[in-house]
Image (cartoon, rainbow, N blue to C red):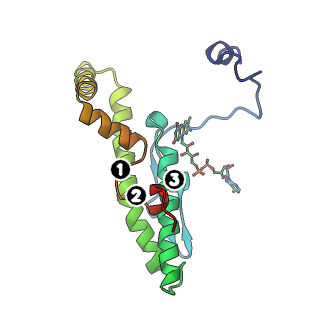
């Protein structure tokens, strides 16, 4: 509390502990499979990414949007929505996006938490390049906002 108070200020009111303190490692976790018989994993149950770029929640929203769309279309076609064939469509849709983003975040994390002078140089040049190139900056902003890739309809603001 003594460390948090000066950093946060008091604009949110009194800061106090709501429960017991708990710590867990911030590391990459990726489920080998996102599905099992009549079960689908979404969100952090399927993937845990380092929170440096605030992508965890975005990934979870995309999982839910994709799963809802796959199940909705299966229902319209009269399929068993929990069959392996249907759930496999969800897994195929989400695995590539999740794996590439999770590995990308893991690389960025390793790059930025390393004091090796060569790596520091690479990251400084990279950051400079991104700041100086509006198209690159826009690309990173779109990525950070979760607006890239094969977006489910719900995340494009469309109804199912
Ligand atoms: C420090 C930190 C900062 C982050 N910052 C960002 C950010 O800026 N932007 C962003 O997009 N993401 C961020 N994330 C990631 C984001 O918080 C998670 O990706 C997101 O909360 C995952 O949502 P979820 O519903 O999948 O899982 P959770 O939010 O973990 O929800 C799971 C829920 O299930 C409950 N539960 C667990 N086991 C059981 C059980 N057996 N029975 C019943 N309930 C159970 C838990 O209590 C919990 O309420 C951050 C994560 C951390 C750790």
In this view of the protein, which residue sits in the foreground, 116 or 155? 155
Residue named by callout 2: 151
Q: Secondary structure at mark 3?
A: helix
Examine the image and state in which quarter residue 1 appears: top right
**Residue at x 30% of width, y 40% of height:** 139
Ligand 1 has an atom within 8 Å of the beta carbon of the residue at disc 3: yes
Determine whether 9 is above or below 151 in the image: above
Residue named by callout 1: 148
Ligand 1 has an atom within 8 Å of the beta carbon of the residue at disc 1: no
Residue named by callout 3: 60
Position of residue 95 measured from the top left corner of the image (x, y, whole percent): 39, 60
Q: Nearer the viewer, mark 3 or mark 1?
A: 1
The tag earlier along the polypeptide, 3 or 1, is 3
Examine the image and state in which quarter residue 121 appears: top left
Q: CA distance from mark 3 to mark 1?
A: 14 Å
Determine whether 64 is above or below 111 in the image: below
Q: Secondary structure at mark 2?
A: loop
Furthest residue toward front:
158
**Residue at x 25% of width, y 18% of height:** 117
Position of residue 22 measured from the top left corner of the image (x, y, whole percent): 67, 35
């Amino acid at each position: 509390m003594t460390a948090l108070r000066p950093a946060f200020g008091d604009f949110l009111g009194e800061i106090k502990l709501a429960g017991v303190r708990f710590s867990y490692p911030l590391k990459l976790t990726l489920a080998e499979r996102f599905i099992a018989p009549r079960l689908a994993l979404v969100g952090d149950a399927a993937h845990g990414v380092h929170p440096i770029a605030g992508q965890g929640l975005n990934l979870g929203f995309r999982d839910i949007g994709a799963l809802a769309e796959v199940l909705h279309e299966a229902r319209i076609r009269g399929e068993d929505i929990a069959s392996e064939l249907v759930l496999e469509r969800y897994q195929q849709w989400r695995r590539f996006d999740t794996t590439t983003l999770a590995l990308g975040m893991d690389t960025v994390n390793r790059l930025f938490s390393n004091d090796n002078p060569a790596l520091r140089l690479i990251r400084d040049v990279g950051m400079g390049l991104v700041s100086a190139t509006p198209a690159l900056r826009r690309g990173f902003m779109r990525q950070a906002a979760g607006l890239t890739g094969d977006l489910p309809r719900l995340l494009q603001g469309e109804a199912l």
